[in-house]
Amino acid sequence: MKVKIINKSHHPLPKYETPGSSGVDLRAFLEKPLSIAPFQRIRIPTGLYLELPENVEGQVRARSGLAYRKGLSLPNGIGTIDTDYRGEIQVLLINLSQEEVTIEDGERIAQLVFIEYKKVEFQEVKKLSDTKRNEGGFGHTGT
């Protein structure tokens, strides 16, 4: 699968770091270091612009090492890049630590995974089929 990309940053194009990597790292594109206060949310530019193929979603995900070392995460869990979006890819970060955290230009701040999806057509019905689980959820199977 090929993805068209414009790179307005001075950083190299994203790449898979290991043969088993499912995502590519996104780097901060900053004029100067950026500090994030505890519980502050901030958008970090990457300088990257994508044109995704039909039925492919870009998923921006947190980097586990950044979450562990600095307490940084994505407040929306996973950010979605739709096929018709042409703006700059930005990463929404939140500082969940109790200390101010600084992001440097070029720092790897998130990962991007590409997922193929299918669109559905809804069929309105009066009843759904029964299963063993039925409406059980939120821990109903125990620990």
Image (cartoon, rainbow, N blue to C red):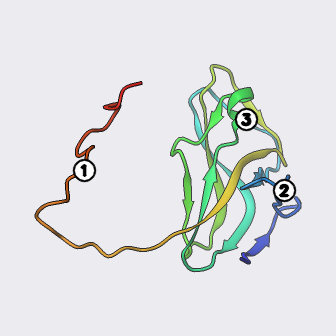
How crowded pointer 1 is (Cα within 10 Å; few <14, some 14-19, many 20+) is rated as: few
Mark nearer the viewer, 1 or 3 = 1
Disc 3 residue crowd, few under 14, some 14–19, many 20+, Cα 10 Å: some
Gap in angstroms between the C-alphas marked 3 and 2: 21 Å
Type of amino acid at the residue the image marks with label 2: Pro
Residue at point 68% right, 72% down?
Answer: 50
Q: Is residue 88 above or below residue 106?
A: below
Quadrant placement of the N terminus: bottom right
Amino acid at dot 3: Leu
**Residue under numbered circle 1:** 131
- Badge number at residue 115: none
Distance from disc 1 to disc 3, alpha carbons, whole Å, reads 41 Å
| Relative side of 109 to 138, left or right | right
Q: Earlier in the sequence, mark 1 or mark 3?
A: 3
Q: Secondary structure at mark 2?
A: loop
Q: Residue 130 at what x, y percent from top left?
A: 20, 53
Q: Are marks 1 and 2 in contact (CB under 8 Å)?
A: no
